[in-house]
Amino acid sequence: MPLSDAAVRALRHADQAIHEADRSDVFTVYDACRAAVGAIAQVDDFYVALVREADRQISYPYLFSNGRWLEGGTMTYGPGGLVAWIVASGKPYRWGDDQGALLNRGMRFGDDDLSSDAVVVPMATEEGVVGLLGALSDTPGALGEEVVTALTWLAGLVQDRILAVSPSRRLNLGMVYPELEDSGRAGTLMAVNQASSALTQLAADLDETRLALGESGCDASLLDRLESLRRRCFEVQASIVTRLGMRPEHEGPGDSGSDPLEGLSPRERAVVALVTGPDGDPGNAGIAEALDISTATVKTHMASVLSKLGLTHRSELRWLVLGHASVQPRGD
């Protein structure tokens, strides 16, 4: 599933922290994973576990519960509990799968209260499950599919960094770094929009800092400097967005230029063609009927399109294709 901007920022920050940590510093790796998931959802407990299937041993090198780290250890896991189920199936566990039945058979973290939501994902190789990442919440429904996706991605990072074994699937870098997979106009749009959002957030942080320092009676020259930096954020933003919006002189409305939709799948291009067609946007129901798919599938395609192109609303698609060759669906 496409990740939200907040989730992408959290995973990128974790990736950076992990790569900057000393090779022997496993705690920073685990803690970065916990912080990333905590930035996406309400997480009260988090753990990293290493599994040795041959003798049913599970070790907990990292346990975090309700704002504090706990003592880890090693134990034997039973044949009918959560760990055994994940080892046998190789699949992520969600609290909603069985309303927490498997989860609550095993050990508890922190206080004695039962968790109200949980996601546990395997660290899996071709030979089997070698570890787990678990996030638990006291808030019902707090951990959705985005947490499953994020935890699975983080599990791949842990395997690569700590266990020195390759995941059973290649780490999907494009999910967190989409600009790596698209060097065309679509990738440029996304990169510019992300940079623009970062500059806006930086300006907001500077303004908040300036106001706080002003209330404390800080020197006026420093406040002026902060305001100057805040203005500079918007100056840079204006410059890069303006350069993106200006087409080269040789590229007129009838020129083909580069394909702004080159990173889309054939089905996604077909959706865009209908939205930007001469008759106007037919809506999800109209698109579903034209392509003989469900409206839920239309929504999935549209979310993916907007994510890949760095857009926030489907109405922006018409602006994107303006001045380029007509958008035609390619063959499946």
Image: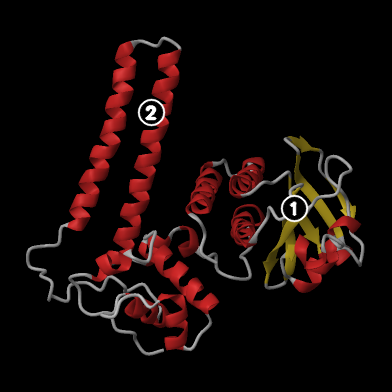
Image location (x, y in percent) of residue 84:
85, 66
Q: Nearer the viewer, residue 217 or 35?
A: 217
Q: Which residue shows up at 51% across the image and 45% down it? A: 13
Q: Which residue is mark 1?
A: 140
Residue 207 circle label? 2
Under mark 2, the amino acid is: Asp
Specify whether 49 is left or right of 276.
right
Q: Nearer the viewer, residue 314 or 13?
A: 314
Q: Which residue shows up at 71% across the image and 65% down it? A: 92
Residue 9 circle label? none
Secondary structure of the residue carrying numbered label 2: helix
Q: Reading the chain from its start, which is encountered first: label 1 or label 2?
A: 1
Specify whether 263 is left or right of 99.
left
Say whether residue 183 is visible.
Answer: no
In the picture, residue 119 is in which quadrant? bottom right
Count of numbered circles on the image = 2
On screen, residue 19 above or below 319: above
Under mark 1, the amino acid is: Pro
Specify whether 221 is left or right of 298.
left
In the picture, residue 150 is in which quadrant? bottom right
In whole angstroms, how far apart are the C-alphas of marks 1 and 2? Answer: 36 Å
